[in-house]
Image: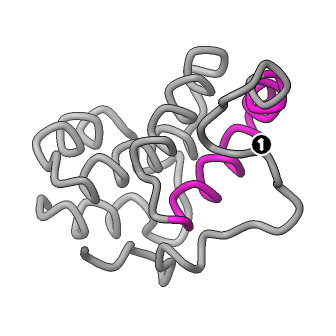
Amino acid sequence: MRQLPLGLTLAGLLLAGTTAPAVAETLEELDALSDLTATEAGGIAAAREAAGRGELLDALAMLERTLGAFPRSAEALLLHAQYLCAIDDRQGGLVELRLLRERDYQDNALEDVRTFCGGN
């Protein structure tokens, strides 16, 4: 698996304090997962934690839930594209990256993900 851009390895994406499982097996776990993705920041944090555990499909699902409620979230959009590339859906990631604007990101974040995905 390739290293994520911006010096963020999958292990480095772990965020402390988020304890809900990525896969909900009970109604309580489903409620907890739903609560995590109810806010933009919570959804992004939950997705990063799942990615940190190597659960990229779960991370993508969390980002999609977050984007359903916050479709203009620049950070969620960028992470979604990045994780698509990380699971070898390079074409999907590049399509999403083409829709993003450089001005919405700092420190070359968009360019770093473009490089990670193999498209400039």
Residue in the image at 55% along x and 40% along y: 76
Occupied quadrant, residue 36: top right
The C terminus, quarter of image:
bottom left
Q: In this view, does 47 lie to the left or right of 111?
A: right
Residue in the image at 78% along x and 41% along y: 42
Which sits in the foreground, 115 or 46? 46
Q: Which amino acid does label 1 sit on?
A: Ala
Q: Is residue 89 left or right of residue 47?
A: left
Q: In this view, does 39 lie to the left or right of 97?
A: right
Which sits in the foreground, 19 or 38? 19
The N terminus, quarter of image:
bottom left
Q: In this view, does 100 lie to the left or right of 45?
A: left
Residue 67, horizontal then vertical, whole percent:
56, 24
Occupied quadrant, residue 89: top left
Considering the numbered disc 1 on the image, is that residue within a helix, a strand or a loop?
Answer: helix
Residue 87, horizontal then vertical, whole percent:
25, 53
Q: In this view, does 34 lie above or below 61?
A: above
Mark 1 is surrounded, within 10 Å at the Cα level, by few (under 14), some (14 to 19) or many (20 or more) other residues, namely some
**Which residue is at the far bottom?**
7
Q: Give the range drawn in magenta.
A: 31-53
